[in-house]
Image (cartoon, rainbow, N blue to C red):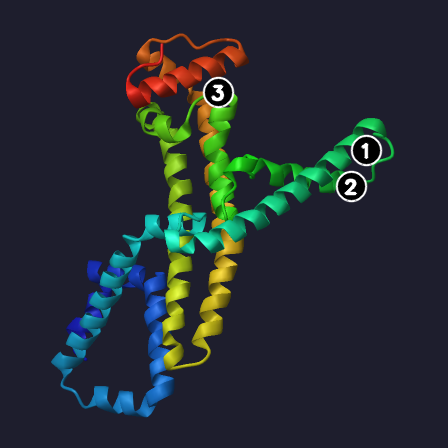
Amino acid sequence: MSAKFLESFGSKLAEQWVATLLTPAFVFWAGGAAAGLQRFGWKRASTWLSQQPEPLQIAFLVGVFCLIVASAFVVQRFDLAVLRFLEGYWHPWLRPLRRWLIAREEKRSQRINDRWQELQKLQRLNPNQITTEQRDELIQLDLQLHYLPLENQIMPTRLGNILRAAEQWPLEKYGLDAIVCWSRLWLLLPDAVKKDLQEARADLNTAVRFWFWSLLFIVWTFWAWWAAPVGIFSAIFIYRYWALEAARNYGELIEATFDLHRHLLYQSLRWNLPPDPNEERRVGRQLTEYFWRGWGL
């Protein structure tokens, strides 16, 4: 290869190369290349590449770079669709599976709630007799309940339940529908709050994107058997230890935003923020109705 091409690693183009190599798109195509080399042999590929003229070798590398960048851009466009899928918003023909998963999540929710009630009663009646393990279990159960929506709003996946619970808390506490009010509240938030929310949402989107790339990795199975277990294990690991945690963090920030900044909605419309919680829930529902349909008073 020419010296000019090697010198390009010190330019802006080199910076883009390095950034691209660190993306899941590169891992996906590198895995595909490894599977292809296993299937067809490294010697054949290296012999073919070495026999090509230098301009063709450079064109080949540039083409690989463009393929990685283009595929990363295309997959990124599906972030929202993949997130909605992981939440449990599925096509109607998957309704039987969705109903089965919702029933399973409802049973899990009931088990958590029953055990929490049992430990709460034990702590209330015998606060000095509850063990450290039981107290730790009570704390964990309380956290799990916080990330579960109301019984009639259960989603088929845990990620969906976490985000659904985050959407419900503003309505339960303040009468504000998060879906209707969020776009209005966003325009009023301080820049520092927006930055934190954007970073949390970016982390969730990145986790979803890595999950999708892991699932796509299974396509290389027709060249190498190990692609399937690698893709499946990666998808499970990313979902359990990254996507769920990112969803919890994002949901908590949404709840905190309504807790601390909901007054901006009232101020922007010159409505008085009710001091009483019960009255605020009633007025909050009126405010939501006003935003959605244009009346509420």
Q: Which residue is mark 2?
A: 134
Question: Could you tell me if residue 22 is visible in this image?
Answer: no
Q: Is residue 80 above or below residue 250?
A: below
Residue 177 at what x, y percent from top left? 41, 26
Left or right of 126: which side holds 97?
left
Quadrant (top left/top right/bottom left/bottom right) for the C terminus: top left
Q: Which mark is residue 174?
A: 3
Residue at image point 50% right, 50% down: 99
The amino acid at mark 3 is Tyr
Contact between marks 1 and 2 (CB within 8 A): the answer is yes
Q: Residue at x 21, y 58 (%)?
A: 12
Image height of 133 relative to 225, above or below: above
Kindly identify the residue that appears in the image at 83 percent across and 40 percent down. Answer: 131
Q: Whole-percent x and y of residue 221?
A: 40, 77
For label 1, the SS is: helix
**Along the polypeptide, which appears first: circle 3 or circle 1?**
1
Look at the image and tell me whether residue 258 can be seen: yes
Q: CA distance from mark 3 to mark 2?
A: 33 Å
Of 196 and 87, nearer the camera is 87
- Residue visible at 49% across and 47% down in the picture: 159
Q: Residue 182, position in %: x, y?
A: 36, 29
**Label 1 sits on residue:** 122
In which quarter of the view is residue 138 placed? top right
Q: Please state which amino acid type lies under the numbered disc 1.
A: Leu
The crowding category of the residue bearing disc 2, from other C-alpha atoms within 10 Å (few below 14, some 14 to 19, many at least 20), is some
